[in-house]
Image (cartoon, grey):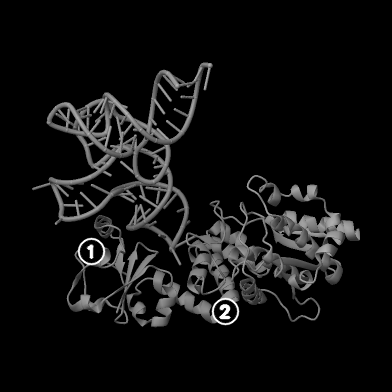
Amino acid sequence: MSSGINSAYVGFDPTASSLHIGNLAPVMLLTHFQNCGHKPILLLGGATAMIGDPSGKSTERKLLDIDEIQTNLLSIKKQLETFLDFDSKVNGAEFVNNLDWMQTMNFNVFLREIGKHITVNYMLSKDSVKNRMETGISFTEFSYQLIQAYDFLHLYKNKNCAIQIGGSDQWGNITSGIELIRKKESMESFALTCPLLTKSDGSKFGKTEEGNVWLDPDKTSPYKFLQYWLNISDEDAKKCIRFFSVLSKENILSIEKSHEETPHLRMLQNELAKEMTCRVHGKKIYLRALEGSKILFGKNTKEKLATISEKDFLMFFEGVPSYTISRNYFNKEIDIIHLLTEITPAFESKGELRRMLQSNAISLNKEKISIETNITKNDLISEKYLLFQKGKKSYIIIQVE
RNA sequence: GGGGGAAUACUCAAGCGGUCAACGAGGGCAGACUGUAAAUCUGCUGGCUUAGCCUUCAGAGGUUCGAAUCCUCUUUCCCCCA
């Protein structure tokens, strides 16, 4: 590794229109790899996405639509571009697409040149296949590891790339590639896998109750994206900042030190959230999302709330339960319980809402309200919205039309 | 095929004729504290027009002034014998 420039590749199958932060671990390995002077190669799995990787899947998957794969491929490519340097003459990152060599590959040639070197016995020993022996696996998905193995061989021969990086679920596929290179070329190649990141509470990293945290702002709003990083526990933040930031070792140690001295400032989380949100969404959007967080979680923010634009308001609250009601209701005062249970189904029962109100859990426009509160049109933000909160983090929006 | 046991709220799990909307634990939600943490403490956790009322303890009937509790049948599950 320390001698000269090496190449390493990571493969991404365009099975979704966006990457999520769980995909980022191998990307960051490549980033660090490049920062050490080596050359990263990003393999887009235009061909492999058409096959379907059985790794980690307990059942056969439906084939993806070919047009969809193309669309996905382009948007994932765009997302990846922000993580690496493509301009360097010396070790600039490079994209390849395995469709380029697979679509001209003749099946007969493939069987003679590639298939002959890997035994079915060997292929069957992989977890991805073994786990499917009971439930069944199609020949198509079974072949996947051979195609990925061939990718590795192809890049070894054409790009002098002897290292493949991936998530730990890719171990089997990668070692098949190493095996193939050894058989065909009598040369050594290397696998580097990163464990699936888990949080200290044992749950999967990069998931919220609503699902994956996506890089695509249409799937996960920048505000939520920022919030995800801000809410990482201290313990996890230490791990994450090493992994996901490109800060120097000294820098990280000094942030950690300040964090320990003044833990309530949450230096680690803030720094991490800033790095990630800026890199994925850009600085401008980061600042807007940050402003939103301050408004929603800061103190004395009722006035501030009134100042944010409708556009930002909608961005911060993208994805929160929202109900639309008629303006006619505001001809007179509205009973709070009537509004939140009957006019809108925001709460499942009046009893529940009553309990919440009695325990001081409900806020309207950032101010606690009681069971006697009546709503008037003066409570409307931008003459259009009512912002309710259940506790600290759970929002409900009522929009007037 | 014969015999025995079980089915209770989101989950586990008490209850064995009235004091049961049903102990307790976990989970969940909220409050206090705090850092939009963790830990801790507190409250809530069937519905309603809430000193009360209504609907719930696998399902359907029955006994009784009164049933989650007793009886009958049905369904499902577990165990033992063949």
Asked whether residue A188 is in view, the answer is no
Which of the chains bears the disc numbered 2?
A
On screen, residue A142 above or below A35: above
Which three-letter amino acid code belongs to the residue tagged 2? Gly
Q: Residue at x 90, y 61 (%)?
A: A185
Q: Residue at x 57, y 68 (%)?
A: A272
Look at mark 1 in the image and give the residue it sits on. A337
Do dots 2 and 1 share one subunit? Answer: yes
> Neighbour class for label 1 at 10 Å: few (<14), some, many (≥20)?
many
The Cα atoms of the two marked residues, 2 and 1, are separated by 42 Å
Count of number-bearing discs: 2
Question: Measured from the top left, where is residue A347 in percent x and y?
Answer: 30, 61
On screen, residue A12 versus residue A392, left or right, reads right
User: Farthest right residue?
Assistant: A186
The quadrant in which residue A238 appears is bottom right
Look at mark 2 in the image and give the residue it sits on. A282
Question: Measured from the top left, where is residue A105 in percent x and y?
Answer: 80, 68
Question: Measured from the top left, where is residue B5 in percent x and y?
Answer: 39, 25
Q: Specify the label residue A220 is tagged with.
A: none
Asked whether residue A315 is in view, the answer is yes
Which three-letter amino acid code belongs to the residue tagged 1? Ile
> Neighbour class for label 2 at 10 Å: few (<14), some, many (≥20)?
some
Which quarter of the rendered picture does the N terminus of chain A lie within?
Answer: bottom right
Mark 1 secondary-structure assignment: helix
